[in-house]
Amino acid sequence: MKVDRRTVRWVRFALILAALAGFGLAYLLLPGFRSEVDRAAAILLQGDIAGLRDYILSFGVWAPVVSALLMIFQALAAPLPAFVLAFANGLAFGVFWGGMLSLASATLAAAISFWISRALGRVPIEALVGKTGLESADRWFARWGAYAVLVARLVPILSFDVISFAAGLTRMRFGGFLVATVVGAAPATFVYSYLGGEAPQYVQVLMVAFGVVIAGAVVAAAVRRWKSGKPVPLGDPDDQVEDTP
């Protein structure tokens, strides 16, 4: 029996919308849940690696699950920093297992971002991640085409969450997106895990360096945009980047 493609898209849209609405209602109506979300966000924003490690481990056997949920949360609540979690996972679970957990949860977060974008379309995603960020992703895909996801994962100053959302607006196949995400994310993820587990004293220095580089990249992008004008948008998923081989 052949399933209508339009029906599948509407079902996907309804499920994702229901999940987002459920989270929003829980945040608004349940003080305990809201307090926990705000606490987690504050720890992530502070960049307190030891504090984040202690917070994750406070959940006992559920600690890996909480870490994965935090990775998904930061992807949907940009600009919370994902690499802080990778540092904390290395400190909490060791280099190998912390790295594996970070890689798996980052891949899951990227997949969720991809499908949310594909289900909702460009306008809601612009509201979620910002028009400027999505326009930067437009330029990235225009430059690298089908390899944009892989290259983005290899460049630590880029917001891969925005790239994941942008990928969902293209014709890129999910399988290709997933492979590119894992292959591109693995090197940096295990480096962060090693620093968190074996050399946490250098983490703050690295975070400051990242901040300086990111600030420089933002200024450079603003100047480039001012000189060249607005980029061409991604548009509809059916009219864009070819499938990843």
Image (spheres, grey):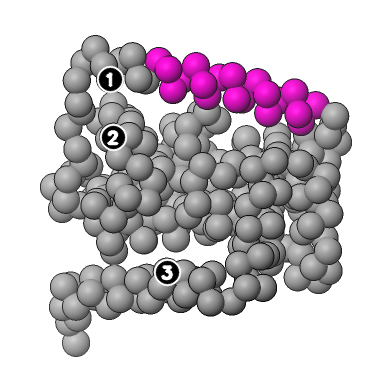
Q: Earlier in the sequence, mark 1 or mark 2?
A: 2
Q: Earlier in the sequence, mark 3 or mark 1?
A: 3
What mark, if any, has residue 135 been given in the picture?
A: 2
User: Which part of the image, by quadrant, shows the C terminus?
Assistant: top left
- Whether tag 1 and tag 2 are in contact, CB under 8 A, the answer is yes
Please, is residue 195 above or below residue 182 in the view? above
- Give yes or no for residue 218 being in the magenta stretch: yes
Specify whether 94 is left or right of 176. right
Q: Which residues are magenta?
A: 202-220
Spatial CA distance of label 2 from label 3 is 24 Å
In percent of width and height, residue 231 lies at 20, 28
In percent of width and height, residue 39 lies at 69, 57
Q: Amino acid at mark 2?
A: Glu
* Residue found at x 20% / y 52%: 237
* Residue found at x 50% / y 52%: 77
Q: Amino acid at mark 1?
A: Arg
